[in-house]
């Protein structure tokens, strides 16, 4: 996966703090399942119990051990073998399965080298040595650590330290009077998505980029290092993709279409997501001599990591010499696709996915999640053998090529776009999995379903439901006097006993093409928060041995994930009416719109303050002449921004959602006693509601991203930006664009609302 | 000095954020000097210009070099020589000077040793080696690093790491299931006053205490280390006193009286301020093997420092062996006291002091401040020779024995208590001095005087006034979105252009006996914020060479300090009416009372929240079973607390202060044309106003501290607690005591107010 950490909370989207109506509604009793008549609900709960009974942690352990026994990156023999193994299993469990192959651009390193020249020369090892107690760490077949989709290059230049390499860091550099033109930047992991670091470095004129793991974020400062503890050892390296996935994920040469053998491909030089400058990830051990070589100002306090040295910004007294040359061949990827056709609604699909490729052995990432998916598939197979069949069609998928850029899922989604938009009602994703608390993100119309399911799965460590445990966790987190306002608001929600909010999704795993390109309602699930996942992320030490000690040693959280995902899949498959609650979306949206108002006000105030300080010469007067800090560049004035269309549309949607909820509740009480054709029409239209949150032209400057409520941020990478057309325009001070996209987003919402009103009419008792 | 850092701001007392009235008053024009008729004001400004013209940075440099040329701790030959040198100078400059000697308990180390036993034994060096480029660092006569007033002991026990060793740290330890009984605690500097660390360790049953300097607070994580940069090198040690100065400062054997040769002394065993357990300060280099030996839980995130290791809480796998044995003899201390008798009001004294003893060479601390005081004395001597004489009496003092516990100032203040309470109208303190921004703390009736003086002294680096530069600094500090609410409020005050607030004083330098024991209006002054003072604080490397590179290389800030302190002294000496503005005190007090209300509400809310979390078993459900964290002990309920007497008294004082200000302004406009006897009576009574903020019985449990508005916190050490009788009772959940001291404090304020009303009557135009 491409996230630095599994989301540990349902609840981190700040916006959700504004919920109140949902919070005061008590949870439905277990039998009052959303989308089910009471009688059907009882049957369904019985089915889920039978499903649970099939889940065996010993099997998850066995699969994980086998699949993580050799390097399984894209193009490796074991990656293909894992796909074939799963194909065999799915078929044995009764699924209609096949492997779907795509051909993708996937450069692999031919030569990587890094040295510090000058009076104290140093040659970086760029190597993760074997570690005692980590059985696979000495195996062959591992590629040298690298960042896929960086440019080729052989450059010699002074180093400059740019902290996390994010936009604010470059503003600070400017105030320090330092620029990176013609330099190699050295940046630490953290603070924003990896791929933004070389992209911004390149935009600022750097000729190369090194990214290292500082022990402050990822090493001894967090906990004991592998193999004593779980955290990154001095020689550990975080690999990862640096494709510009905010433009589009998937094969860089086939945006928007499946990279099938005959597909029309871009020339490499025209692929917008490929960087031009060389990039290399390095270990803290290799970074230390480089950081020590830096002169210039002492780094600002927040830029300092945990290495035992004084961090300077640079430039370095000596030059560094960086070489990265790759083999730019295409490689095949292997998606395993397994299906069970629905009995009564075969044209409504529930898609469930997890990827199977790793950076090296990938025990945590992705196999811990993938074996949960396999357990679900096996259990569902057993239910089939007991005579059950889902009402809707199930599609289970194990994706290849997620790590370099969601390749397997994106190419499949693009290749089958039309069919998916016609049929898929839900995509359920998982990725890595660990011990601790349920994390769930996704489309907010699914929030109540997630809460109902979470209340029905038992936490292995505490024996309360995973929902109740999460509630306790949020209450504790928000009780810290230093907790952020959102955490405090979530603690209050948790204490009040209503539904817990789910997180809005950005990117970083395989839900992205389904949700953000195709507009299919999606979820992303996983447990975490008690494990030491960070420490071996994307390294050679992400191994079975590590997972057994610091992941989920008993595989009970693997089983818990299979239960949560499985119940969501089964419940959606068999519901009389799809278990969606649009009021939850509408309330969440209200929160987002409120945030936009606050963002404008905050920006206006900050701008006025900055202008006041500049006009008073306060920056100059405050500056220490021995450590000069230039005044910041003057920000543009904030004009009036017209959010009224958005306010109006959100308000109308609120009322429409309320009407739908009333009609839905009334019909549910009557056992959904509608004419069969009307019920079918209702379900069909409900299943496509999320698509009405998209616009064909997509977001400004990146048409692949079509969802107008959720998107990965252009300048946050994986981190979500909600109502992105408007929010990112404000953040980037493109005032006209903010006005324009407030109107366009309002139009999108109006289409959604019109369809919702149509659903309400379909629910009317007799017409 | 005993502060870890010179206060860099006028403005850090949170309370002052509530000022508004003062802020909207524009600063008086330079000629509108508080306490002066317009004609007299012009003369006064001329006098101050002549004073300034006498100040020569080259002299400050020469004195500093000489006085820091050998170790000058209490009892050292050079400490005495410095006193004698100053005596000679003062006399040559025309002052009536003498040395006043006291005999104080001052234990010095006979044997200090520290070793780690077990399989990986280690013997601590306990030594600061000579450093290239630091000429005095190889000189003999330096005592081994130690903490004065710790107990004698020779103990062998496991180590436990207790972070800063503050009360909250022990609460966290309890939740981790760890106690320190029978252990040696290792704690880092920071987070609270040094002396509290062994005191709290002792109260929790520890048998020994080590205090080390972590590079996170004080070393390479802050900047380059000495001699490359100014920060503490790996082998640097922070010495310091660990007497329980919250009980009383001064000689532990003579609380409340001067330790003159014949004074009645306590037996050592009865001295409440002496610790029983051995304590030793150590360097980061010596601490590293000890910290590495610790097992048990990984330290909580906020407990981790910047050494390259994973911080564990302990206990250690091996035992440590600590020996501290001292020579408990009495030693003489030498206060230099110089006087110029006032022409018209010889019985009104302005006392100005700085100490001269250091921990080793003491170039920064205290000599940088002491040479400013000397420059003032020389300049005043020159004015005398020009024919000027102060109207009130000037007393310049260079204290000995400040470092072990404000010995010289306290014994002198105690020995002369009656005369000082009868005569002293102001005490002006300084201590270390550096580059940057004016820091001023003290009695709030002096706030306007400080602001007027700060607006008339030019900052050496920017050529604006030191007041204007501070204003810019506060505006910038408060503009950070992460700034604390107080910093934001101060930024607003600064931007609005009114008076800047001065800080409330706690303890840590020689103002304490004057302000808090005798009730004499006091100020503490110094520049800082741009220097790297922290790094060599209380170490062998606090040297002339260090000061020349990282302090105030041109001594222009030494001159600026001499100007600020000198102008305050001269202006108070010659004012027609003492330059006090009681309305500033009254408004500050309103802020403090408001804070108490908020504190109660905050405590009440936090208690309710903790009870809710305990009742919901949230702590238990949130806890990771592999890293258990016990629920906290249940806090007592918060009853209704009766602050009404305080509210009423503060309100009445506000009105009385307003009436006084009106009467004062009217008289000032008339040139203070009052009968001479009435003017004398007014001045005499004004000069004793601050004493009315004291109560003879003192604060709960520590009768030496008699000021009811300002005191060092029992659990913060040097950090101030305002309205301490009430505030500390609330913080310690002694609810009855809070009620009782609200009433007692109100009675104190009522006496102050009654006297203020009397002053107002004296100002009446004709009666």
Image (cartoon, coloured by chain):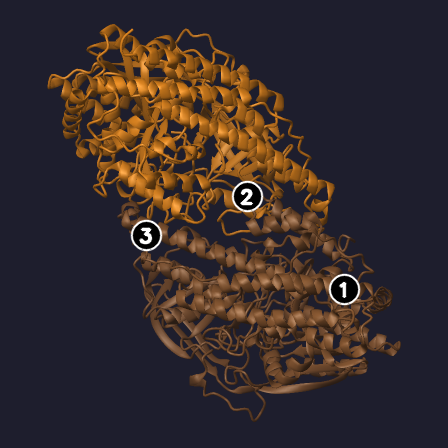
Chain colours: A brown, B orange
Q: In this view, does A516 lie above or below B499?
A: below
* Chain letter of the residue beneath label 3 in the structure image: A
Q: In this view, does B613 lie above or below B107?
A: below
According to the picture, the residue beneath numbered tag 2 turns out to be B290
Disc 2 to disc 3: CB gap under 8 Å:
no
Label 3, label 1: how far apart the Cα atoms are: 53 Å
Say which of A346 and B179 sits in front: A346
User: Looking at the picture, do discs 3 and 1 lie on one chain?
Assistant: yes
According to the picture, the residue beneath numbered tag 1 turns out to be A34
* Chain letter of the residue beneath label 1 in the structure image: A
Rendered location of residue B319, percent (x, y): 61, 39
According to the picture, the residue beneath numbered tag 3 turns out to be A611
| Quadrant location of the N terminus of chain B in the rendered image | top left
Q: Is residue B265 visible?
A: yes
Look at the numbered disc 3 and give the secondary structure of its residue.
helix
Look at the numbered disc 2 and give the secondary structure of its residue.
helix
Rendered location of residue A708, percent (x, y): 54, 70
Rendered location of residue A423, percent (x, y): 69, 80
User: Looking at the picture, do discs 2 and 3 lie on one chain?
Assistant: no
* Chain letter of the residue beneath label 2 in the structure image: B
Which residue is the extreme one toward the right? A386
């Amino acid at each position: 996966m491409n996230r630095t950490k599994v989301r540990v909370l349902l609840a981190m989207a700040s916006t959700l703090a504004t919920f109140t109506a949902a919070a005061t509604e008590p949870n439905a009793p277990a039998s009052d399942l959303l989308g089910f008549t009471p009688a059907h609900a009882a049957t369904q709960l019985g089915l889920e119990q039978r499903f649970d009974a099939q889940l065996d942690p010993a099997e998850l352990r066995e699969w994980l051990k086998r699949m993580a026994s050799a390097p399984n990156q894209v193009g490796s023999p074991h990656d293909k073998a894992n796909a074939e193994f799963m194909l065999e299993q799915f078929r044995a469990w009764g699924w209609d399965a096949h492997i779907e192959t795509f051909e993708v651009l996937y450069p692999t390193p031919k030569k990587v080298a890094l040295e510090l020249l000058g009076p104290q020369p140093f040659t970086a090892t760029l190597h993760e040595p074997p570690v005692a107690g980590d059985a696979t760490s000495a195996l062959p077949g591992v590629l040298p650590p690298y960042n896929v989709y960086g440019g080729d290059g052989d450059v010699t230049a002074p180093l400059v330290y740019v902290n996390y390499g994010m936009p604010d860091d470059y503003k600070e550099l400017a105030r320090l009077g330092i620029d990176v033109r013609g330099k190699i930047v050295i940046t630490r992991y953290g603070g924003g998505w990896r791929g933004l670091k070389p992209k911004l470095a390149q935009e600022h004129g750097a000729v190369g980029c090194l990214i290292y793991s500082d022990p402050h974020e990822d090493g001894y400062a967090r906990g004991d290092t592998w193999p004593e503890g779980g955290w990154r050892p001095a020689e550990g390296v975080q690999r990862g993709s640096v494709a510009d996935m905010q433009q589009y994920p998937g094969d860089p040469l086939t945006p928007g279409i499946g990279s099938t053998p005959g597909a029309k491909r871009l020339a490499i030089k025209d692929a917008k997501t490929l960087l031009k400058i060389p990039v290399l990830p390095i270990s803290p051990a290799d970074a230390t001599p480089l950081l020590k070589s830096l002169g210039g100002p002492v780094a600002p306090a927040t830029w300092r990591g945990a290495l035992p040295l004084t961090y300077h910004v640079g430039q370095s007294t000596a030059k560094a010499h960086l070489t990265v040359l790759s083999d730019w061949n295409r490689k095949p990827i292997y998606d395993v696709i397994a299906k069970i056709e629905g009995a009564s609604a075969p044209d409504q699909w529930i898609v469930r996915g997890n990827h199977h490729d790793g950076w090296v052995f990938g025990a945590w990432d992705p196999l811990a999640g993938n074996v949960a998916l396999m357990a679900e598939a096996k259990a569902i197979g057993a239910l089939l053998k007991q005579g059950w069949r889902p009402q809707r069609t199930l599609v289970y998928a194990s994706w290849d090529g997620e790590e370099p850029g969601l390749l397997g899922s994106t190419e499949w989604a693009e290749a089958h776009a039309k069919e998916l938009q016609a049929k898929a009602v839900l995509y359920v994703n998982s990725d890595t999995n660990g011990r601790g608390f349920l994390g769930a993100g996704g489309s907010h119309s699914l929030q109540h379903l997630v809460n109902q399911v979470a209340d029905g799965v038992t936490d292995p460590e505490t024996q309360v439901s995973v929902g109740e445990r999460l509630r306790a966790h949020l209450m504790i987190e928000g009780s810290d006097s230093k907790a952020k306002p959102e955490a405090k608001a979530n603690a209050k929600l948790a204490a009040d006993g209503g539904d817990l909010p789910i997180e809005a999704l950005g990117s970083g795993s395989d839900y992205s093409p389904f949700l953000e390109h195709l507009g299919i309602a999606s979820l992303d699930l996983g447990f975490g928060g008690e494990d030491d996942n960070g420490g071996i992320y994307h390294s050679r030490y992400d191994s079975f041995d590590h997972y057994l000690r610091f992941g989920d040693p008993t595989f009970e959280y693997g089983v818990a994930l299979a239960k949560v995902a499985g119940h969501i899949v089964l419940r959606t498959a068999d519901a009389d009416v799809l278990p969606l609650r649009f009021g939850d979306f509408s309330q969440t949206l209200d929160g987002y719109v409120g945030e936009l108002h606050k963002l404008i006000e905050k920006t206006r105030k900050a701008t006025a303050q900055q202008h006041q300080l500049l006009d008073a010469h306060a920056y100059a007067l405050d500056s220490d002449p021995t450590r000069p800090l230039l005044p910041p560049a003057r920000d543009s004035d904030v004009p009036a921004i017209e959010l009224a269309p958005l306010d109006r549309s959100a308000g109308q949607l609120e009322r429409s959602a309320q009407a739908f909820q009333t009609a839905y509740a009334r019909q549910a009480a009557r056992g959904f006693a509608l004419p069969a054709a009307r019920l079918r029409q209702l379900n069909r239209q409900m299943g496509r509601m999320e698509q009405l949150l998209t616009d064909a032209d997509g977001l400004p400057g990146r048409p692949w991203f079509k969802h107008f409520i959720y998107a990965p941020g252009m300048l946050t990478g994986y981190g979500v930006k909600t109502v992105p057309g408007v929010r990112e325009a404000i953040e980037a001070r493109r005032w006209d664009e903010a006005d324009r996209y407030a109107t366009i987003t309002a139009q999108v919402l109006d289409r959604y609302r019109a369809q919702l009103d149509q659903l309400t009419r379909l629910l009317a008792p007799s017409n």
